Image (tube, coloured by chain):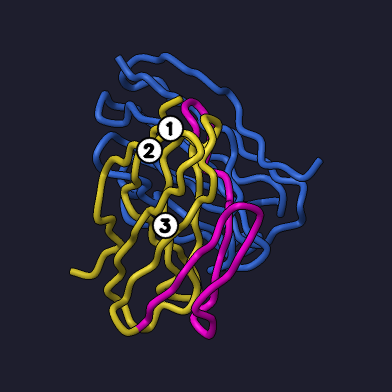
Chain colours: A yellow, B blue
Amino acid sequence: GESVGLHLPTLSVQEGDNSIINCAYSNSASDYFIWYKQESGKGPQFIIDIRSNMDKRQGQRVTVLLNKTVKHLSLQIAATQPGDSAVYFCAENRSNYKLTFGKGTLLTVNP
Amino acid sequence: EAQVTQNPRYLITVTGKKLTVTCSQNMNHEYMSWYRQDPGLGLRQIYYSMNVEVTDKGDVPEGYKVSRKEKRNFPLILESPSPNQTSLYFCASSLLAGETQYFGPGTRLLVL
């Protein structure tokens, strides 16, 4: 069946490095994608989103890239900090009434 | 402050004892949803509501009930909790269905 998935369940980086978290999706009809960050003991927090009519969107230290040809979504975090350590989820809007979430990637930032 | 609140944050109960987890949002959002989060399974949708008095099943609705009598509130009801409902529960809301959802802080439930 169709699903939102992640290439890597864990990612470990050094403080100051750039991080790239990947997500694959299989529904070509999905038109809206979101990245969430979930810190330990907290609810998922919105980071950045992108619509299918764009291929790149930038926020503060974060960039989301969308490659519709290969159905791939990535989150880039610049100059990763210890406070960035968390689980990151991608989500896609497959229909008008629900989002479908990936299982998440655990990002660990080493000092 | 715009937010989604849930109560209680932590709950230990016994099998069969009815419980309600409340959810409230102050953003005038039309869409609200409940999820459970389990290790290795990610976020799974239990029920959702497109608007007042409109609710529908998500992916894992068995054993749960919801109601949406007011726009801001969306309680989750477990009529007869069982140990397999031990989980971390999140309420979320969005302005409209399919848009960015904002999550509450979570309710950790243990059913003995």
- Sequence-earlier tag: 3 or 1: 3
Tell me which residue sits at (40%, 49%) in the image: B46
Chain letter for the residue marked with disc 1 in the picture: A
- What mark, if any, has residue A90 been given in the picture? 3
Q: Is residue A44 magenta?
A: yes
- Asked if badges 1 and 2 are on one and the same chain, I answer yes
Relative side of A69 to B19, left or right: left
**2 or 3: tag closer to the N-terminus:** 2
Residue B8 falls in image quadrant: top right
Which structural element holds mark 3?
strand
Span of residues in magenta: A39-68
Q: Residue furthest left?
A: A1
Q: Disc 2 marks which amino acid?
A: Val
- In three-dimensional space, the C-alpha distance between marks 3 and 1, rounded to whole angstroms, equals 19 Å
Pointer 2 and pointer 3 on the same chain: yes
Residue at disc 1, secondary structure:
strand
| Tag 1: amino acid | Val
The residue at the point 40 percent across, 73 percent down is A94
Q: CA distance from mark 2 to mark 3?
A: 19 Å
Above or below, comparing residue A107 to residue A111 in the picture? below
Question: Pointer 1: what residue?
Answer: A109
The residue that label 2 is drawn on is: A13
